[in-house]
Image (cartoon, rainbow, N blue to C red):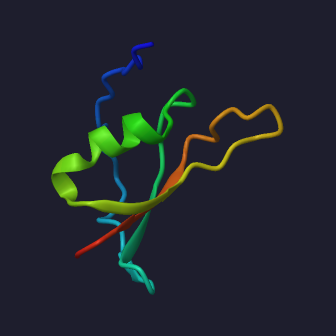
Amino acid sequence: MEEEHQDYQMKQSNYSKPEMKDSKTGYEICIQGLSFSAYGPDIRKLFDNCGKIVKLKVPTDNQKKSKGIAFATFEKK
């Protein structure tokens, strides 16, 4: 079975550049404003050019639907 991938576009916003938090495994950022249908493979593909993601958390609601945010830990800054 082939995985379906959707193309997502980054929206310009008034937010400043996300602050990277140094963690034990790399540098963690919070990604906001994602589609509620965006999950791990889609998010990894979207941020692939930013570096290797070693850990990715996508919070979900009680019905296992994405909350539109993710926490990604990159290997390098």
Residue at image coords 29%, 65%: 17
- Residue 64, image x, y percentages: 73, 35
- Residue 37, image x, y percentages: 54, 26
Compared with 49, 74 (above or below) is: below
Q: Quadrant of the C terminus?
A: bottom left
Residue at image coords 69%, 43%: 60
Check the image and name the residue furthest to the front.
Answer: 1
Displayed quadrant of residue 46:
top left
Q: How many labels sit on residues?
A: 0
Q: Quadrant of the N terminus?
A: top left
- Residue 12 or residue 32, whichever sits in front: 32
Compared with 53, 38 (above or below) is: above
Compared with 64, 24 (above or below) is: below
Check the image and name the residue furthest to the right.
Answer: 62
- Residue 41, image x, y percentages: 40, 37
- Residue 43, image x, y percentages: 39, 41
Residue at image coords 29%, 39%: 45
Check the image and name the residue furthest to the left.
Answer: 49
